[in-house]
Each structure stands twice: as structure tokens, then as C-alpha cells.
């Protein structure tokens, strides 16, 4: 069965430091992969997505993610974190069948220290 | 601007009540989804619909039902609310095909007392 694991429930980084959020997936075929962000009191916003091609994907707000098939990973990175990046981050994989169904990871809460 | 709207942002109900959560999309999409979001569990799919009057169970359908009488509206029904259904409920609607962005509503935070 398809699944997504985000090993880190909470992460705290200092403002200006680099960030990497981990995501591992289990999927039988080439996955469609997504990262979403949910700021406090806000809805889910798509940061970036991977379907095929270049394994390094650029997203909004200075985020990027790298698809590594050999490691079944799709980690999210940002070189310099801003206080406004404090939020909950979700990795998701598109389920087979072309329905638009997503399977989400457990989420990682990012806290940014001044 | 595309939109998915949900009827309430916050809702408080009592155990045993019948609860309706409404979701409306203005994008003429066939597919619509209901997820619930709980801390440490991420988003889990309750039900989805791929056409009017069509529905399929997701991963956690127990205690819920749905209704899709019109293409733009997808309702989630808690037949007899229980305290373990206290959660954030998110409606979503993707364009055709799983390769594109899924649009989410703002969510309804339901508290069952």
C-alpha cells in the first residue's frame, strides 16, 4: 500500500539557518509528489510538486525539493529560513488511478527561533 | 480565482447530533474530497466523489456519510456525532487527473461536546 512518512514531528531552527524536512514514500510506480504548507489559521497551500523530469524542483517562497528514487525520498529544503516560515508542512503522494486522491504524511511542525 | 468554500470555519455540536458540513467549488470539477486533519496523523481521506451521486469510501469512512446531489456541492454528514469526531475537516477539489494542484477549502474546525 502507498504511504508517506515524515520522520520529524517537530523541528526548530534559528532564523537565517538552513532547513531540511524529510519525506519518505512507499509507492509502486513513479510517484507524483507534493509539499504543502499550512500556516496557523490558514488553509493548505501548495509549495511545489514533482511529476517527472528534473529531480530538483523549485517552489514558492524560496523552497526546493529533491526527488531521490533510490532513497524513496522527497526532502524539502530552504537555504535561509524566515520567521514567517513557521508552519506545519505536509508531504503527499498522488494515489494511483488518476482521481486526484492524495496520501499525506503525518506533518512536520516548524518552529523558527529569532 | 478558483475557490473551494466551506460553510463554517468553526462548529460546536453535542454528542448524538446530526451534523452537516458543506463544501462548494466553483471550478466545475468532477472530483471532490473530504479529509480530516488530526495532530500527528496528517490528513486522512474520509470519502470522495468523482461525479454527481457517485461516492467512494476513503481510508476512514466509519461514522460518516456523504451526499453529492449537484456537481458543485459535496456534503459530509456525521449521522450521530461523537467526541472522537472532534477534528479539522478539509474539503478539496482537484482538476481532472492526479498530476495537478488540488485546491483546498479553509477547513471547518468541529468540536463535539
Image: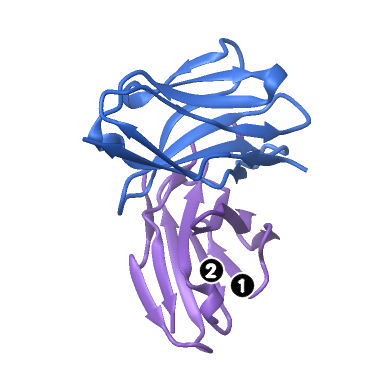
- Between B22 and A22, the residue placed more toward the observer is A22
- Between A108 and B17, the residue placed more toward the observer is A108
Q: Which residue is mark 1?
A: B64
Q: Would residue B48 be seen by someone viewing this image from the given angle? A: yes
- Residue A31 location (% of width, % of height): 67, 28
- Chain A on-screen colour: blue
**Residue drawn where x is 61% and y is 17% of the image:** A52
Q: Which residue is mark 2?
A: B76
Q: Decide: is A57 above or below A102.
A: above
Q: Local crowd at mark 1 within 10 Å, few (<14), some, or many (≥20)?
A: some
Residue B10, quarter of picture: bottom left
Residue A1, quarter of picture: top right
**Residue drawn where x is 39% and y is 66% of the image:** B109
Chain in purple in the render: B
- Between B94 and B15, the residue placed more toward the observer is B15
**Residue drawn where x is 42% and y is 58% of the image:** B24
Q: Chain of mark 2?
A: B
Amino acid at each position: 500500500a502507498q504511504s508517506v512518512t515524515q520522520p520529524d514531528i517537530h523541528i526548530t531552527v534559528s532564523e537565517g539557518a538552513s532547513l531540511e524536512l524529510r519525506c519518505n514514500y512507499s509507492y509502486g510506480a513513479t510517484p507524483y509528489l507534493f509539499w504543502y504548507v499550512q500556516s496557523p489559521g490558514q488553509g493548505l497551500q501548495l509549495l511545489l510538486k514533482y511529476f517527472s523530469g528534473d529531480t530538483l524542483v523549485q517552489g514558492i517562497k524560496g523552497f526546493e525539493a529533491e526527488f531521490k528514487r533510490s532513497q524513496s525520498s522527497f526532502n524539502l529544503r530552504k537555504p535561509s529560513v524566515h520567521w514567517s516560515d513557521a508552519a506545519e508542512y505536509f508531504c503527499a503522494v498522488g494515489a494511483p488511478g488518476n482521481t486526484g486522491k492524495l496520501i499525506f504524511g503525518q506533518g512536520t511542525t516548524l518552529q523558527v527561533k529569532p | 480565482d478558483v475557490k473551494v468554500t466551506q460553510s463554517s470555519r468553526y462548529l460546536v455540536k453535542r454528542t448524538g447530533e446530526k451534523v452537516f458540513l458543506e463544501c462548494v467549488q466553483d471550478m466545475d470539477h468532477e472530483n471532490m474530497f473530504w479529509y480530516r486533519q488530526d495532530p500527528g496523523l496528517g490528513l486522512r481521506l474520509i470519502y470522495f466523489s468523482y461525479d454527481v451521486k457517485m461516492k467512494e469510501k476513503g481510508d476512514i469512512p466509519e461514522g460518516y456519510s456523504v451526499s453529492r446531489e449537484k456537481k458543485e456541492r459535496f456534503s459530509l454528514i456525521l449521522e450521530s456525532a461523537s467526541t472522537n469526531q472532534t477534528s479539522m475537516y478539509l474539503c478539496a477539489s482537484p482538476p481532472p487527473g492526479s498530476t495537478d494542484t488540488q485546491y483546498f477549502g479553509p477547513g471547518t474546525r468541529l468540536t463535539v461536546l
